Image (cartoon, rainbow, N blue to C red):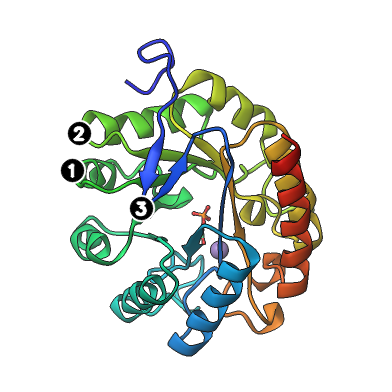
Amino acid sequence: KVSRKSKPEKTIVKVSNIEIGSGKPVIIAGPCAVEGEEEYLKEALFLKEAGVQILRGGAFKPRTSPYTFAGLGEEGLKILARAREITGMPVVTEVLDPRDVEIVAQYADILQIGSRNMQNFTLLKEVGLINKPVLLKRGLAATLKEWLLAAEYIVAAGNEQVILCERGIRTFEDYTRNTFDLAGMVAALDLTHLPVIADPSHATGRRELVGRVALGALAAGADGIMVEVHPEPVKALSDGQQSLDYNEFQNLMTMVKRFISQS
Ligand code: PEP
Ligand code: MN
C-alpha cells in the first residue's frame, strides 16, 4: 500500500492548514523535550516568528539511561496543547507505549513513532487505528525495506496519513551520532508515495553540522525538516549537543527561506 507502484501520485498529509508532501518543504522545530511551561511557550513564540510551521517537543522521552530525564508525561502534553492554543501551530510529539496512544492523540496533532519503536508492531497497529497523522522515524538499524514495511503496518491498519523521517542510522562511524542516509532518503522518496522528511539533529548529533545537513536534505528533495532548537543548549535536559540556539536557528531559517523561494 505504501509503494509508488500501488499509488503513483504523491500523498499529501494535511495537518490544520499545512500540507506535507505538496512540493513545498515544511519546517518542524522545537526542543528535544518539553522542559517546562514558561520555557516552552516562549520558545514556541520565537519559532513562530522565525517561520516554523509545526512545533515539536517530547513529553514521553525514550532515554538510553533509565536515570536521565524521561519527559513530563501528560503535563508535557498539556503544555504542547497550550502552545498550539497560543500560536495556532500544530504540534508533534512522540508516543512510546500503545497504552498512551489515546491520550497523546487527545493533545497532539501528529503522533511520532521514534526510532527505537519503529518495529514495535503493537504500537504501529495502534496508531494505525487513529485519525491523526503519524511521523514514523527510521529505526536505528533499519533497512529501507524494514522502514517501509513498518509504514505498511500503519496504513494496513487504516491510517494513510504517514510521514516518514530519515534520522540517521548506526554505522561504524562514531564521529557523528548516526550516519545520515541521504541516498536512503532519496530512494524512499522514489519508492513510496508518502512524504519523507529529514531530521538532521539526531542524524548528526552535532550542532555545527545540523544546518548544512538540513540544507542538503532539502536540496535532495525532502518534503521537510525537523530540527531541535533550545534557547540554551548547554542547559538542555536532553540532546543539547545537537540543539541549535536561537541565533543558529535564525541563520538556518534565512538559508531555508532562500532555498524555498528559489526552488
Ligand atoms: C526525538 O525526536 O527526540 C527522538 C527521540 O528521535 P529518535 O527516535 O529519532 O531518536
Ligand atoms: Mn532528541
Marks 2/1 in contact by CB < 8 Å: the verdict is yes
Tell me the quarter of the image containing the C terminus. top right
Crowd rating for badge 1 (residues with CA inside 10 Å; few <14, some 14–19, many 20+): some
State left or right for residue 29 relative to residue 207: left
Q: Distance between the residues labelled 3 and 1?
A: 20 Å
Nearer the N terminus, badge 2 or badge 1?
1
User: Is residue 123 among the parts visible in the rendering?
Assistant: yes
The residue carrying mark 2 has its beta carbon less than 8 Å from ligand 1: no
Closer to us: 241 or 253 = 253
Q: Residue at x 40, y 43 (%)?
A: 118
Q: Residue at x 50, y 71 (%)?
A: 65
Nearer the N terminus, badge 3 or badge 2?
3
Q: Which of the labelled discs sits on residue 129, or is there none?
A: 1
Crowd rating for badge 2 (residues with CA inside 10 Å; few <14, some 14–19, many 20+): some
Provide residue 203's location: percent of width, then percent of height: 65, 49
Marks 3/1 in contact by CB < 8 Å: the verdict is no
The image quarter in which residue 92 lies: bottom left
Nearer the N terminus, badge 3 or badge 1?
3
Crowd rating for badge 3 (residues with CA inside 10 Å; few <14, some 14–19, many 20+): few
Q: Which of the labelled discs sits on residue 158, or is there none?
A: 2
Provide residue 195's location: percent of width, then percent of height: 48, 34
Q: Which amino acid does label 1 sit on?
A: Leu
Q: Residue at x 56, y 33 (%)?
A: 23
User: Is residue 173 among the parts visible in the rendering?
Assistant: no
Q: Assign a secondary structure to mark 3.
A: loop
Q: In this view, does 149 lie above or below 204?
A: above
Q: Assign a secondary structure to mark 2.
A: loop
Q: What residue type is labelled 2?
A: Gly
Q: Which amino acid does label 3 sit on?
A: Ser
Q: Which of the labelled discs sits on residue 16, or is there none?
A: 3
